[in-house]
Amino acid sequence: MQVYSYKDYDIPASEGGELISHESGFVTAISNETANEYLHTCGRMHVLPIFVILRHHESHFTGVQHGDLFLQWQAEGDPSYAAEIADPPDCVHEYLTPLADTRVNLLETESPHEIGFEVYSNGRIVPLREDSEAVNTVLWRVLTMRQRLDVAHYRMGWPILDDAEYQVEAMEQLMYTAERRMYEAAGVDPFATGTRATIHDECASGPKRHQLTSRSRMLVATYQELLRTASADDLTPAHSIKLEAVEIWYRKERGARNLHRLSTAEISVSRIVQACQTQVESLRGRFAYLPYPELAAKELEIAQLLEWGNSEDMISKKSALERLAVDPSLPVDQQEYCVQWIREADVAPAVNEWCILADATRWSRFREFVEPEYVRVRPPQVPDVEWAILHVLLFIIRRWGATTMGRTPLTALAPWYTSYPVLQILCAEILDGDWSAATTLQNGLTWEEWEDTGRYPPTFPSRK
């Protein structure tokens, strides 16, 4: 058994600099005897500490639920909590009235081993260290479960936990800021991290993913095998699940997106992609809606994926230039360089727009006044076909949004490709029709959690 706690560390701000206080977590392993003693102490005090169980086969922690027992013990010494329970167990009604002739006095403490309150019953102080039925019965009805946890630690001789209210929003903002700084230190540009504002919302939410019934969900091993197989159409019920979602999306979106009318027999992933090839937003929305988008992508011809990827590459280049064109941190002449580049691409025929945006001479000039992370050109060591595939992954792979790469969807993709061999393998295998490596991207969530689409809605990164 392990106990996870927090404490302050004094860390030098710089080499030889002053010390700054930094709170961080630490873990302490305890023996089975101590663990049993602690759990028995908590049980006698009607305390349910927070437990997490490590499932080694999933490399993932899960929580523990206690059902009505939690409601009962939480309500015992807290009449206000008992009154808020919508459908309380019968025993909770007696907790609505505080115990007579008892009071709790709060105390100032100087040591982490001192408890911050004292309890009186019938005019006499209750000995908190005494683990007897008479004492515990009074404490159940007088103290909240959080206070009873302090008593359990007090009896164990452990430090009393900090009871200051946890500022969730402040902590989330602190973590967000720290994450942004780490990304920028790794070479991600400030627009992608959110440090610099973009001209519009470039990471809008997409459609809610098609809901699956419990019978329609697949185990990860099954899904991986489907993504490896040569023809997904021959496999049921996986193909039926995919086709049902495609049909529902088409009926919902055909009018809004001005798609060609197709009969039920004609509706397929390939036909819809062919109809939407010039409508990038439609392609993104279609795959964001499908419950198993990688399986649907197997139905596409490589030429269709490459055409879509080249369109996304062009959008990525143009959006990067548009952001810098209005960036006040750039000198006016450099902003004007971006503006002129965009203007020439806009007025050129569609067939020439890609050539202008991919012009190697212009990008060489561009490199002279911006940091490398703003550049959106294919490195010479990356094959052009894999470069195109790379640009559609974030719109197809369901788990992409929770990966390190998916957290900054506006960033240049070249550093991710060169830093993560799994991406190189994935792009190469997709060209051979194998999408199974898409399920191996690290994101901190179990496969079962990703199947629960209500709890983890799909991310929908946008380049424009």
Image (spheres, grey):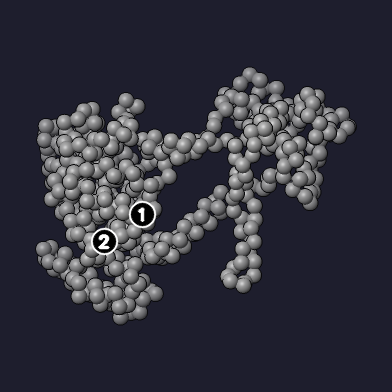
Quadrant where the C terminus is found in the figure: bottom left
Q: In the image, is 34 to the left or to the right of 202? A: right
Q: In what quadrant of the picture does the N terminus appear?
A: top right
Q: CA distance from mark 2 to mark 1?
A: 15 Å
Which mark is drawn over residue 167?
A: none
| Residue at 79% from the left image edge and 49% from the top image edge | 108
**Horizontal and vertical percent for residue 303?**
13, 50
Examine the rendering and report whether any part of residue 281 can be seen. no
Three-letter amino acid code of the residue under disc 1:
Met
Secondary structure of residue under mark 1? loop
Q: Specify few, some or many for label 2: CA neighbours under 10 Å numbering under 14, 14-19, or 20 or more.
A: many
Residue 260 in the image, given as x and y percentages of width and height = 12, 43
Q: Amino acid at mark 2?
A: Ser
Which of the two residues, 168 or 40, is positioned nearer the viewer here? Answer: 40
Place residue 124 in its image quadrant: top right
Q: Residues within 10 Å of mark 1 (few under 14, many from 20)?
A: many
Q: Which residue is mark 2?
A: 316
Question: Who is closer to the viewer here, 64 or 409?
Answer: 64
